[in-house]
Amino acid sequence: MSNTIAAISTGRTVSAIGILRLSGSDCAEIAGSVFSLQNNTPLKDAPNRKLMLGTLRDRNGRIIDQCMAVYTRAPHTYTGEDTVEIQCHGSPAVLAAGLDALFAAGAQPAQRGEFTKRAFLNGQLGLSQAEAVIDLIEAETADAAANAAGQVGGILQATLSPIYDALTNLCSHFHAVLDYPDEDIEDFGLEQYNGALQSSAKALYALLQTYGQGRILKQGVVAAIVGKPNVGKSSLLNALAGYDRVIVTEIAGTTRDTVEESVMVGNIRLRLIDTAGIRNTDDQIEAIGVTRSKQAMEGADLVIFVCDGSCPLDQEDQDVIFKCMNAENAIAIINKSDLGCTVTPSDLPFAQVISISTKNGTGLDQLSDVINVMFANDAPCDGSILTNPRQFDAIRRAYEAMLNALHGLMLGLSPDAVLTDVEAAMAAIGEVTGNTVREDITARIFERFCVGK
């Protein structure tokens, strides 16, 4: 019997509804000591999965809310244990007093992610499903939410489980022949498993190939806005953000450090980085900002070059343009079109050149369209896209171990030598599915969660 935990499962701000959640073998008795049903039936005798009206009291017995509760019996619950949810009016004071009363009645404070961790430990969720719960909570776009929901539903688990099972069959056959030589077991030969090994390696490779898109799906497009000082980089960020996020003046070098802001541009989440103007300078502080600007360019998914279209390009512009040429994705912005343009698209060596005015907003819709086409997501966001860096690392190690096993098979190595790599692949896959996950890994995973989930 596990101890009963309790937590507030909704936000700590004023809202219409707030939820107190309990899980554990005696949750009904504990909840029933602070919540009494209107029909005077003990909560532990309430119908399964039915919302019941009642009264919530604090630890001193004072009535603090007229609300609802639902008692759900194991094993058909989120955690696999008996659970109770008390659905109150969303006053932070009511929720805090109710939680305090539950603690006084014997419940233990839930740790971060403990409800979902119990779901995993009780076999209600695979590890990849449990890990996707926090991705769903933190999703910032509909596509990211859809992909996380697919993984909560078991898409990734269903992709990896057949691979793990196939490798398990291979290893178990070998050890059966080795340990029981007198039994009537089919002789073991690695050659008969060559196709299975190749098929498993291909499936892992295909999954790894989705991670580039998945990283952007989950984290957004990191976009560095670059250019020489005073061309309108900060004004562009402010225009895209919809408010004055960055101080803007006519003084060159106002921005001394990188400034970040997350914005939606069409269907794409942009992690905009407004950088210090790139130029040679004797100012020590500005020089540090220029160095950080160059680092931001190197780590960006998209580089947005900005120039002042009302003035001819000069050497400082050309120096920044040269640095942009290594970017995988780059867009050139000719700003200040409201002042008349002396710079034309043919003057800039970029595939995408857009004239805009951050002052009156012209051209921003075209910029949005270009970015949406550039980072369009054609794959179905059904859970089949790998978005988690920890999972990516584990699957990468599994794939490399599979390649080593196939190479050993080609060289004619002994079965035990080849199966060492197969077992390494299984261990890595198990870190994603939960078959072989270590306690320190699970602790690190559920530390990402909020209390109450």
Image: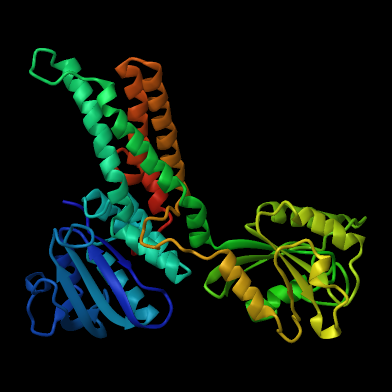
Q: How many numbered discs?
A: 0
Residue 226 screen position, x and y as percent: 76, 63
- In this image, 113 relative to 360: left or right? left
Q: Is residue 172 above or below residue 203?
A: above
Residue 428 visible from this viewpoint: yes
- In this image, 448 relative to 260: left or right? left
Q: Is residue 393 above or below residue 262?
A: above
Q: Tell me the quarter of the picture where residue 102 sits.
A: bottom left
Residue 91 screen position, x and y as percent: 37, 82
Residue lying farthest to the top in this orientation: 182
Q: Is residue 405 above or below residue 98?
A: above
Judge by depth and name the residue closer to the eye, 293 or 353.
Answer: 353
Judge by depth and name the residue closer to the eye, 345 or 296.
Answer: 345
Residue 197 screen position, x and y as percent: 33, 32
- In this image, 147 relative to 181: left or right? right
**Residue in the picture at 85% in, 79% down:** 341
Please say which color scheme the image uses. rainbow
Residue 269 screen position, x and y as percent: 55, 68
Q: Quadrant of the C terminus?
A: bottom left
**Residue in the picture at 21% in, 32% down:** 169
Judge by depth and name the residue closer to the eye, 10 or 349.
Answer: 349
Residue lying farthest to the front in this orientation: 346
Residue 112 visible from this viewpoint: no
**Residue in the picture at 18% in, 58% down:** 81
**Residue in the picture at 89% in, 67% down:** 313
